[in-house]
Amino acid sequence: MSVPLSPAGIRSRITSLLPTRADLAQARRDPRRDLLAGLTVAVVALPLALGFGVSSGLGAEAGLATAVVAGALAAVFGGSHLQVSGPTGAMTVVLVPIVADHGPSGVLTVGLMAGVILVALALLRAGGSMRYVPAPVVEGFTLGIACVIGLQQVPNALGVPVPEGERVLVVAWRALEDFARDPGWASPALALAVAAVMLLGARWKPTVPFSILAVIAATVVVQVAGPDGVRPIGDLPAGLPAPSLAFLDAGALGGLLAPAVAVAALAALESLLSASVADGMTVGQRHDPDRELFGQGLANIAAPLFGGVPATGAIARTAVNVRSGATSKLASLAHAAVLAVIVFAAAPLVSRIPLAALAGVLLATAIRMVEAGSLRAMARATRSDALILVLTAVATLVLDLVQAVIIGLAVAGLLALRAVARQARLAPVPLDRGDHTEEEHELLAEHIVAYRIDGPLFFAAAHRFLLELTELADVRVVILRMSHVSVVDATGALVLKDVVAKLRRRGVVVMVSGIRPGHRRVLDSVGALELLRHEGREYATTPEAIGAARDHLERTGVLTTSPAPAPAREAP
């Protein structure tokens, strides 16, 4: 990851992240198809934008503002031709505790700061780093997010006020208690009906936007029948508010830095994951991860100015965009434009949508997020993958999303280190290509042992097997063949130095062969080779080392006759 340090380098880097003529040319190829795809996505996105705005705690108008402003900017400046951005359930999970601790102004400030962080990550070329997130971590937090989104809808689905509480499990339980004290069945019936229509309709005709049809039908039923206890969204402004920084409190920036980093990390992860999904659904489409971060950064800088919540790339809406035949950024830009028209022209109608209907939309969305086949495959792959998936999902549900990802990555890293460390071992040197048992016995009779170090010589493995050498008995010379060492770090080099020193104190001569040029710097930096060089104990090949060992033992009187020379074809 290179960092542009000079002003000229920064300007050049920014220029490389801006839209190009190729983007405009692609948008002109099939505008009719892209506009129809954008209309389809807008119909699907409307109830989701409203629902996620309500779930975040800032209201439906915040969700609409995010979908319009962030959706348009991310479409123009993002690195994917097919990505659709806006408010998402994963982001809502992170925003709820921020609203509780810092209020709406804190969320807007966090979104602005997160946008700046995303732009900085794009300038630092950090987009490619997301490919190192293991699949079990992604599947685990997706499962956890789906559970959290479903639990968040319990109060609105039951038609009770949202209870106080920081943990979604606590809030859902308190909502159930409130409902049990004074049950009203209109809201639960409405939520379940909307969810059922969406899930069954998607199986019957996947191309039909059943979410908006179900919401419209639920709104009509409520307006005609007027059941008790069903609350609507409420008044919405007829248009977007004027951009403003009135929410910004310079004194609060320090306390909001940690939430801003969390929001930026989630926005980067979800947006790049969504863009990768879009690439996989098409032929010939490849997103630019750094441009995608740049576009998401600008979108998140602008959205708070209009009262919007932080945005990310939305996997569900992006998938609808691809399946609807989108070919360029024009489709996602058209989606934002259609939503803007709805905000300006149909706010009074939208305000009548029941909250229970939106809860049903999000319940169905949560269920559709869970890919049962992928979860089964991941759980059956290895025990390590299953463990990472379960830990990440549980941590998402019990703690929060960012902590869950950190835990998942940490566990995945530890398990990967353990697997790599197990590859490191000591093995007797194969002295020729045939039966070498007789030759090995001959060396043992001469008080010489020759070992090959296989695999990585690093902090997680070196102590486990190298210290076994210090326990060798009745040996005068130890030969270490290092041509099969894959990597050496400072810890491995220090352990090797310690082993050589201990063997020398016992009067055992240590010789090494086949040291790779790339490993010399590490071994030299800790003085591991210095113990060998001044006595000439380093050799290019193992046969040379064996010959030198026999010469040494003859000079010291241990050997009285010279045995046959070692095979000439021995590897380094």
Image: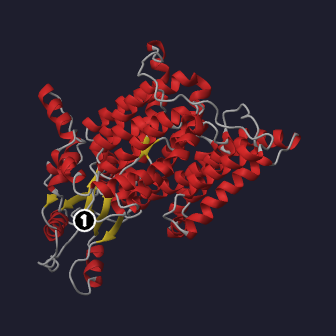
* Front one among 208 and 188: 208
Residue 485 in percent (x, y) is at 26, 61
Residue visible at 18% across and 51% down in the picture: 25
**Side (left or right) of 29 relative to 238:** left
Residue 130 in percent (x, y) is at 36, 49
Residue extending farthest to the front is 224
Q: How many marks?
A: 1
**Quarter of the figure that contains the C terminus:** bottom left
Residue extending farthest to the top is 251
Depicted 286 relative to depicted 440: above or below: above
* Front one among 131 and 245: 245
**Side (left or right) of 427 relative to 86:** left
Q: Secondary structure at mark 1?
A: loop
Residue 99 in percent (x, y) is at 58, 28
Residue 12 in percent (x, y) is at 14, 34
Residue visible at 54% across and 65% down in the picture: 383
Residue visible at 42% across and 43% down in the picture: 338
Residue ID for mark 1: 484
Depicted 24 relative to depicted 205: above or below: above
Depicted 3 relative to depicted 80: above or below: above
Residue 501 seen in the figure? no
- Category of crowding for the residue at label 1, using alpha-carbon neighbours closer than 10 angstroms: few (below 14), some (14–19), many (at least 20): some
Depicted 320 relative to depicted 291: above or below: below
**Side (left or right) of 494 relative to 51:** left
Q: Amino acid at mark 1?
A: His
Residue 351 seen in the figure? yes
Residue extending farthest to the right is 181
**Quarter of the figure that contains the N terminus:** top left
